[in-house]
Every structure is written in structure tokens, then in C-alpha cells.
Amino acid sequence: MMSSTSNDTASTVDVALIGGGVMSATLGTLLRQLQPGWSIGIFERLDNVAEESSNAWNNAGTGHSALCELNYTPQAADGRVDISKAVVVNEQFQISRQFWSYLVEKGVLASARDFLTPVPHMSFVWGEDNVSFLRKRYEALSAHPLFSGMEYTEDQGQINQWVPLIMQGRPEGQKLAITRSLRGTDVNFGVLTRLLFTYLANTPACTLHTKHDVTDIKKVDDGWQLTVRDLRQNEVRTVNARFVFIGAGGAALSLLQKTGIPEAAGVGGFPVSGQFLRCTNKDIVARHLAKVYGKASVGAPPMSVPHLDTRVIDGKPALLFGPYAGFSTRFLKHGSLMDLPRSVRKSNLGAMLAVARDNWPLTKYLVQQVLQSEKDRIKALQDFIPDAESKDWELVVAGQRVQIIKADPDKGGVLQFGTEVISSADGSVAALLGASPGASTAAPIMLTVLRKCFGDMLPEWESKLREIVPSYGQRLSSNLELCEKVTDRTASVLGLPA
């Protein structure tokens, strides 16, 4: 989509954004609203932006709002379903919706329909215990204003109306249950990312450089000095920046380590790869319109919850099932097999070994996934589509995810799921590590970056931040009136069901 857009040879910028994904695009767009006069330099090592985890084919595009993802509502030993994580995730997505609505209203984005499509979100289970769990989950969530309008049924006739593809050929006598929310979305984060970078590149004092690889970061008196290789010309130059954001996906860890900041000590990464089955039969694709999530296998990482997904990519519907997890030592889909070995340091070796020792179920799960045959993958698909045939599906490689490993005084090391912003004490550099829910919560994550790195400027920015995100500084979950006002407004602006 884009090549390097600038012939500017300036070696100093106020802000350097490393990585051409949705995180850098979101932070850059926020800063452009807050400080229009700041200069911004963006560096992406691939030919185009949005080619790694933000690419539509490399992520689920669910618009994670905990409407259907069962891993956000764990069940305790006493049978109680804990919805606290689901509430947090949904609130985070509401912030993203507010941010996108502001951009549409200001003309930064011409239309939300370019990247956002209403698609029902559903949770589907079978078996007595799972049905009991889903019923309790529904009762807990539907009573919360953020999840109003959610529906539940065990009636197979009703299920057949909602998802006929799932019911065709299903054995009689199965105990089934499903929830549905019409507030769900499919988000093409690749398109969104490209739109935001196009906007940024056309604003004053902003330069976008693709095929530019940041190979080193060193502290200097007034900020940071980046060593940047122009991969087209095979030339190296230096760029100084007052503030650096490392939003390079899996590559963020190695760049963070190069900064030498104490906060990076003891941090490691565990890469997990993924694959999907993509339907090649247009008649089958046309018979399904929903994102349907099931329960994860024992030992599976959160992002490996099986789901049958309607996607809308380049204006065309597609149908994917997965993910099938795997293991690769690459930290990026287009990375090196040496990424993991090169990330090992004295400071994180103990934590990484402790995680390897304590996560045998995950290791076993990944080995099983790697050894799966085509027959095994189709068998997993048939839990969702009983009459699925291999001739209608092809295997595609998804994006690479790197989970966070951190030192722990009691266990030696822990494997963390989710995302985390790691920043220096002076706020001059920050990196985003981790994975799901990732892109869906880019806006609230970047607000965290602002809080950690620009705390002294927040009072000056507060009124603008409230214009961008009307719920800024407040909890929707504890303010029913604000919750209804915000969700109705964003639904109207974005063209989504209220």
C-alpha cells in the first residue's frame, strides 16, 4: 500500500514510532490530535504497513469485547462464573469505539464501514457441564449494562435459525446451548492501520519510512538515538528522538532489550504460532454469518480458543476456523528462526527455564498441535460443522504471537497472557509486549502509554482527551447513564446495532 513517503533527511524528531502496526498508528494519531506541532518519524522494516499481526489474515479480527470469548469468564471450583475480566475487556473495546467515532466525526476516517462490519458474536457449547456453565455465564453477563441484549437458548430449532451450518448433520440427542449478541463486530485492523498511517503521512512534520529497519537504540542526553538501515538503498543513518515507542509486535522484545533500561531486565518471550482453516466453498461461506466461539482445550493458551469466524476482508465475506496453535522460534511471521535464542539474556534465563518447567500442559498441547494431521484438523472442525469435508478447506498461516515471560520471586518466572506496556522511569521510551486482546484494545493501551510517559502533560491534554474519549477517566461499568449514552452514540456514528 505504501512505500517510504518522505524525502526528508532530518535526523531529529519529537516522536519515533517503531513498527507499522495498529499500535503505532493509534498512538501516532492520538499524539497528532494532542500535539499537532510535534514531528513524528515512523519506521517499518517490511514493504508496507500492517503486514504482520495487524494484517487481516493474521488475526481473528473479532473486535474483542468478551461477548463470545469464554476464556474471559472462568468458572471457579464452586461453579460461580467470574465476569470481571469480561467487563474490563468490554470497557476497553468501548474506548476503541469512542476513539474511532471521534475520528469519523472529524473526517480522519471517511467511514467506519471501511474497516468495521456488524457480525453477531456467539458462544456455542455441548455437553451437560458446558451447557450449565454457559447458562450461568449468560445469567451473570446479561444482567450487566455492557452486555444488555444478549440472548440464550438451548432450543435446537432456535439454534438452527441462528447458525444453520452448525446444526446440519449434527447427531440427535446432543445437549447444546448458545448465546448471541447482535452488538458484535468484525474488524479489519489491516485496513484501519493503513487508513491511519495514510492520514498521518499527509500531516505536517510526519514521515513514514517503510523498508527501514531499526537495528539499535541507545540513550543520549536529550532522548534516544536510533540506528536505522534503509533496506532499499542498503544505507545506515541515525535518528534522534525525544520519545520512542516500540510497537513492533514480536520484535519489540529485542528492541526493548537494546535500550538497556532496568525495567526490561528479566523479561523474556514465548512465541506461539497459529494456523487457520479457510473455507474455499462460497456456498458454505454464504450459509454462515457469525463469530462462534467454543471452549478451549486443556492447556491451550487463551488465544487458541476454537472459533468459526465470519470475516469481511476487502469487502468480501470469508469463513475461517481455528486457530491451530504451533511453535516456532520466530518472533514475527516474517522473522528469523534465531529470534528466540537471541532474546535469551542472563537476566531472563532463570525466568524462561522456570516457565518451561511449570507449563507442561501448554508444552504438551503445543506438541500435539504441531503433530496434527489434516484428518485431525478436520475432526476438530467437525465439532462445529459436523458434515465438514477437507476438500472445502485450506490451511493458512496466521500471525505470530509472543507471550510475556517475567521474573517472579516465588516461582522464578511466570508466563503472562495479554498485553503490557513497559516504559523507562523517565517516560522517554515505551514498548508494548504480549498478544490478545491486542488490536481491539489499541486505544486504551495507548492511553496507558500517555499516562506512563507523558504524565506531566495530561492536565493540559485532559479536555482534548475527553473530546476524543468521552468516558476518559470514568468507568462505564459503574455509570449506567454514561454507559448507555456512550454505546448509543458510538453505535450511531459507526453504523452498528445499538
Image (cartoon, rainbow, N blue to C red):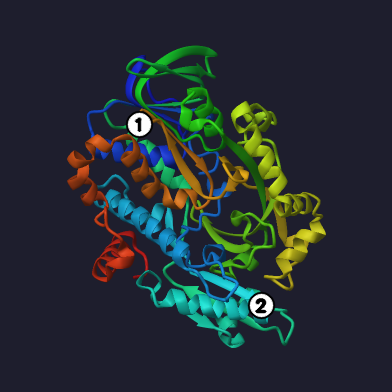
How many marks overall?
A: 2
Q: Is residue 387 left or right of residue 147?
A: right
Residue 64: x %, y % from top left: 47, 58
Which image quarter: residue 291?
A: bottom right
Residue 482: x %, y % from top left: 25, 66
- Seen at 69% across and 38% down, the residue is 353
Circle 2 residue:
126
Which image quarter: residue 281?
A: bottom right
Q: Secondary structure at mark 2?
A: strand
Task: Residue 198: give its label.
Answer: none
- Mark 2: few/some/many CA within 10 Å (<14, 14-19, 20+): some
Task: Residue 427: give its label.
Answer: 1
Which of 354/488 is in front?
A: 354
In this rendering, does residue 89 appear at all?
yes
Which of 480/260 is in front?
A: 260
Q: Secondary structure at mark 1?
A: loop
Q: Is residue 217 left or right of residue 393?
A: left
- Seen at 27% across and 58% down, the residue is 474
Identify which amino acid the numbered label 2 is placed on. Trp
- In this view, the residue farthest toward the front is 410
Residue 62: x %, y % from top left: 50, 58
- Seen at 43% across and 41% down, the residue is 23
CB-based contact (under 8 Å), mark 1 and mark 2? no
Which of 248/348 is in front?
A: 348
Dot 1 or dot 2, earlier in sequence? 2
Instruction: Name the front one of labels 1 and 2.
Output: 1
